[in-house]
Amino acid sequence: MEDLHQRALEYYDKVLNHLQMIIDNVFDGIIIESKGRVIFCNEPFEKIVGLKKEDIVDKSLSSILKDEELISVISQSANTEKIEISIGKKQILFMKSAIQISDSISSNILVFKDITMENFSQAFSKELTGNLEVLEELYSHAYHGMAVVDDEGKIIKWDYEELLGYKEEEVLGKYAPDIIENTRLHIVAKTGKKEICDLQLVNGRYLITSRIPIVRNDKVIGAVGTVFFKNVDELKNLVSKIEVLENTVNKYKSEISRLYKTKYSFDDIITKNKKMLSIREVAKKAARSNSTVLIQGESGTGKEFFAHAIHDGSQRKYGPFVTINCAAIPRELLESELFGYEEGAFTGARKHGKMGKFELANGGSILLDEIGSMPIEMQAKLLRVLEAREFERVGGTNRINLDVRIIASTNESLEEQVKLGKFRQDLYYRLNVILVEIPPLRDRIEDIGVLSQNILENLSRDLMIGVRRFAPETIEVLMKHDWPGNVRELRNAIERAINIAQGDVIYPEYLPDYILDKADFNKHQIVEGGLLKNIVAKAEMDAIIKILRECEDNKTLAAKKLGIHRTVLYKKIDAYNINN
């Protein structure tokens, strides 16, 4: 009896070995369970649960999935029954199959198919499947007919029977133009110049043909002609179908991009400054790789613009873009915000735990803003995570694989912070793979004009205020300020001016006083009326208001008193934003 049992075990091992060879080469997550323990798993299952093989094998399914309801559904499912379940944020199609090795030995094969993206867009998958149909149709219509001529244009090889109706023995040795209508094979055999994808009229229809010279020892000894499509209309039809498929794919790409869209792209980084243009090119190149990027610059210089643009310009643009301000979160909460926590990890922890920023960013990019403010003890853990590309939630034991592009930003010099002992040198080197250093606005005065105009247009739209424009002297004032708050301060000043301006022109008097003071303008003169244009405009506006009051807002009567046409009066009322 023991011998029989031993043979059953040996057979069982052989079965497992065969299964392992098969399972290792499939894309679905698969585990083999026996006596309540996992005895085998493949790599796709590791990715589904975010664990390594050593954390799965010889463990119970309940300790791996940590969801009693889910375990109940799996255990109660019928053999080969397909059911949809959720593991974390993934949608999984699950199926169980029982294997009976002997009366005493049995196992379950559990299959976990990740259908998250399938559920996201079944239509997308259907359209992509159509690609194969188009390619099959393309191949079926692609007729690879061929004819070869010698240097005299005589046919020496023939594969045009289906196309022209002549058998090879009927045409060999004959002059190609006598057999093939409108051929140029004999010409190519003389000139040695190839002709690719040319239109050739044969029997009343256009064919797409190519003619290539045959060269031996630098001498043209003949030419070969091929026909790819028997009918141009067939090509047009297929091109049309391919265009429809491309449009559909682009539509779904746009939808995915919209879901994960960043606020800014490289088009939003506006500059005329040579140094900034060079920095923008460095950032564009950085976007094409997965290397860590460190963005340094004073507060308000636009570090967030660059971070968003790098993600938007990368292959990860269809993945999530997650930001976390390391200075805005209390040090005791920063670890759980970054890496998440398990249920019961600390007092007040949510039931079922919470995903951290790194977990949310998996498959995309994460911006660690104000990285220089990160506590030194957290820097050590971050370094380990970046090097191991895996982490554990607070209070957890399961390792989660990390597939995230790291972008860090700071308004401090991390190199100086390292010297002061406030930032780890090893982490600094790990982050400073590609450095994007943004100069302050005072060092790129030529950008103030284009930035101001761009900010003005965007704010006018966002605030739902009519389009405004700057008086030339206003830009002159702006260019004389040193902008310690950089672009953020410039935006603030322009927003103030837009809100208090009368009419559609932004004059210097609408700017904050401290900017006018630093620009050495006569504050009193500006407030009273300013430059000659302002004096004239203000006098005209005061006169219109005075007459309108006298006429009790009767526009016709007021226009007569002012000596102007009523239409002109309405335009001036709009221009000066004069309310009743």
Image: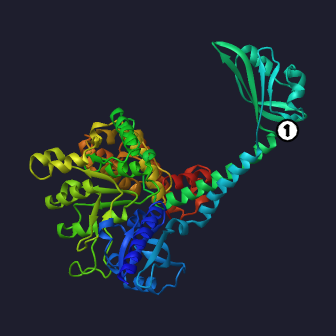
Disc 1 target residue: 162
Residue at image point 24% right, 46% down = 484
Can see residue 357?
no
Drawn side of residue 380 relative to residue 177, left or right: left
Residue at image point 40% right, 57% down = 364
Q: Is residue 231 above or below residue 263?
A: above
Picture quarter containing residue 325?
Answer: bottom left
Residue at image point 55% right, 56% down = 253
Dot 1: what SS?
helix
Drawn side of residue 553 relative to residue 282, left or right: right
Q: In this view, does 172 lie above or below 319?
A: above
Mark 1 closeness class: few <14, some 14–19, many ≥20 residues within 10 Å:
few
Q: Is residue 154 above or below residue 510?
A: above
Residue 183 drawn at (x, y percent) = 83, 24
Which residue is nearer to you in this view: 523 or 294? 294
Amino acid carrying mark 1 in the image: Glu
Can see residue 346?
yes
Residue 369 drawn at (x, y percent) = 27, 56
- What is the basis of the colouring in this image? rainbow
Residue at image point 57% right, 65% down = 121
**Quarter in which the N terminus is drawn:** bottom left
Which residue is nearer to you in this view: 233 or 441? 233
Drawn side of residue 564 relative to residue 392, left or right: right
